[in-house]
Amino acid sequence: MNLFRSEEHIAHWLDGRSPGMTTTVVTLSELAHAWWGNRLDPAWQPRSKAANRAILDSLGLTGPLWSLD
Amino acid sequence: MEAADLQVRNTTYHGFVELGRAPVVGEIAGRLQMSVAEVGASWQRLHGLHALVLDGDGSSLRMANPFSAVPTRHRVRADGRWWFANCAWDAFGICAALHVDGHISSVCPDCSEPIEIDLVAEQPSDTSLLFHSIVPAARWWDDIVFT
């Protein structure tokens, strides 16, 4: 999971391999805050797969590559 | 997750943040007045539940996601310290977990040029950058270190 300067840099780095998921760094920040924001809470509990799915869905991160199953 | 394992997990995470590095098993055992063997067994169970990640020998921490116990290309300045993140997503996750602004230093894997981002109020200073994961989400935990 890496940061790239542009789509061209991703394509060049893939060098013919099948691409994975690409999103903007703005969405990545939203995802990270939704996903990791409670990690140090004293009342932290493991999150269900359905709850993880809901976070991805709320940010439009859908489709086969974003499937958790 | 059993309550005792949850306590070990929380103590491990808070120990990581307080120390600014991965705690060793004896440090957690000391904080909880448990034996090293008991904490080690708990860490193994937490590893199996993907609540943390142990190194190959199973005795030391590799990840307390989003924090990395080992140096990586993804560094974060937050809360007065430098941290290593496991990946680009986790770099943002460190600021999220600590609830602070920060600075992310990474490298474009294609051109090897540095990538520097200020993160203020959850907003990245350079919005032109892209995030890419070559591993589909369903397979992230097949090899979490590679992911």
Image (tube, coloured by chain):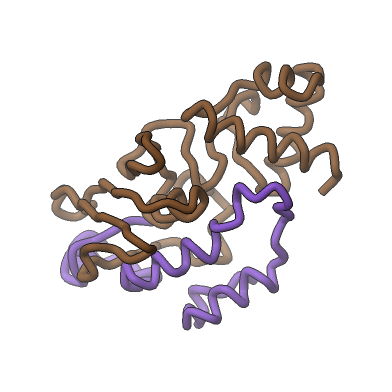
Chain colours: A purple, B brown
Relative height, residue B71 to residue B66 (above, below): above
> Picture coordinates of residue B54 (x, y %)?
60, 34
Residue A38 placement: quadrant: bottom right
> Picture coordinates of residue B104 (x, y %)?
30, 49
Task: Identify the residue shown where x is 53% and y is 66%.
Answer: A34
Task: Identify the residue shown where x is 24% and y is 61%.
Answer: A4
Give left or right: position of B94 versus B118: right
> Picture coordinates of residue B42 (x, y %)?
77, 33
> Picture coordinates of residue B22 (x, y %)?
53, 28
Using the image as rendered, state which of residue B32 and residue B25 is in the foreground.
Answer: B32
**Total label count?**
0
Task: Identify the residue shown where x is 33% and y is 65%.
Answer: B131
Using the image as rendered, state which of residue B36 and residue B7 is in the foreground.
Answer: B7
Relative height, residue A60 to residue B110 (above, below): below
Relative height, residue A19 to residue B45 (above, below): below
Task: Identify the residue shown where x is 26% and y is 46%.
Answer: B105
